[in-house]
Image (cartoon, rainbow, N blue to C red):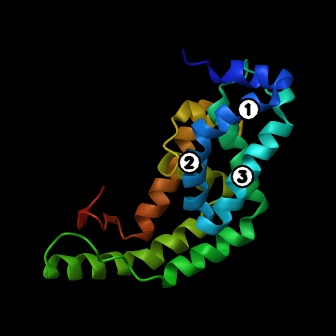
């Protein structure tokens, strides 16, 4: 029988080793989110730090405010905010990074995809940098962490409707930066 997350947090107050179950359940997911935000090297440290902070603050976890998973994403997002300079440097590096061309398509398709993506890559990174911190957090929590609107609202402690408006605003700005098209499908996106 699987014990729910909130019960594990409560049990860990008496038996600290129980917290390891939460680590095992969510570490890879939190790591992927952080790697998408800050790169793999930073994610290695910050994913571990996320669980260290969660362990230290487990007494303050309130199941009435939401589930453990979004709580962990909230901690991770706060750690990202503390490392904004690293994120900005990573986005600048992203502008200069060559596109991966290992797709299983023919040579002509790979060349076309690479040229299209490369032309959009710098514009996308620049547009991400220009988004407000709140809009970027919403967009990346949904795109990289695959959180629901409700979970993003909990992570950022904002109303549900604000998540939708920030996401809509971020998408419009990114679409405009890419000339109104989606480089992955090569046509107009809206």
Q: Label 3: few (<14), some or many (≥20) within 10 Å?
A: some
Q: Secondary structure at mark 2?
A: helix
Residue occupying the point 54% across, 53% down:
32
Could you tell me how far apart the alpha carbons at marks 2 and 3 are, in whole angstroms? 10 Å
Q: Secondary structure at mark 1?
A: helix
User: Residue 60: horizontal and vertical position, in percent?
Assistant: 85, 28
User: Residue 103: horizontal and vertical position, in percent?
Assistant: 25, 70
Labels 2 and 3: the sequence-earlier one? 2
Residue occupying the point 61% across, 39% down:
24
Residue occupying the point 65% across, 42% down:
73
Q: Nearer the viewer, residue 21 or 113?
A: 21
Judge left or right: residue 77 versus residue 82.
left
- In the displayed structure, 123 sits above or below 134; it is below
Q: Nearer the viewer, residue 134 or 115?
A: 115
Q: Which residue is mark 2?
A: 28
Judge left or right: residue 20 versus residue 31.
right
User: Residue 66: horizontal and vertical position, in percent?
Assistant: 67, 24
Q: Which residue is mark 3?
A: 48
User: Residue 159: horizontal and vertical position, in percent?
Assistant: 65, 32
- Circles 3 and 1: CB atoms closer than 8 Å: no
Q: Is residue 154 visible?
A: no
Q: Label 2: few (<14), some or many (≥20) within 10 Å?
A: few
Residue occupying the point 30% across, 77% down:
101
Quadrant into which the C terminus falls: bottom left
Q: Which residue is mark 1?
A: 19
- In the displayed structure, 86 sits above or below 133; it is below
Could you tell me how far apart the alpha carbons at marks 3 and 1 are, in whole angstroms? 13 Å
Labels 3 and 1: the sequence-earlier one? 1
Q: Quadrant of residue 110?
A: bottom left
Q: Secondary structure at mark 3?
A: helix
């Amino acid at each position: 029988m699987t014990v729910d997350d909130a019960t594990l947090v409560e049990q860990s107050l008496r038996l600290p080793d129980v917290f390891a179950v939460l680590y095992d359940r969510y570490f890879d997911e939190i790591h992927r989110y952080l790697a998408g935000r800050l790169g793999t090297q930073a994610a290695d440290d910050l994913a571990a730090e996320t669980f260290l902070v969660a362990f230290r603050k487990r007494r303050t976890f309130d199941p009435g405010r939401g589930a453990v998973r979004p709580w962990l994403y909230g901690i991770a997002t706060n750690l990202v905010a503390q490392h904004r300079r690293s994120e900005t440097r990573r986005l600048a590096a992203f502008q200069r990074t060559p596109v991966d061309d290992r797709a299983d398509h023919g040579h002509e398709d790979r060349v076309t995809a690479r040229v299209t993506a490369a032309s959009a890559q710098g514009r996308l990174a620049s547009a991400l940098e220009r988004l407000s911190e709140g809009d970027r957090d919403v967009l990346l929590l949904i795109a990289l962490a695959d959180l629901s609107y409700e979970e993003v609202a909990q992570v950022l402690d904002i109303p549900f409707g604000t998540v939708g408006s920030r996401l809509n605003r971020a998408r419009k700005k990114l679409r405009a930066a890419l000339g109104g098209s989606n480089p992955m499908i090569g046509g107009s996106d809206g």
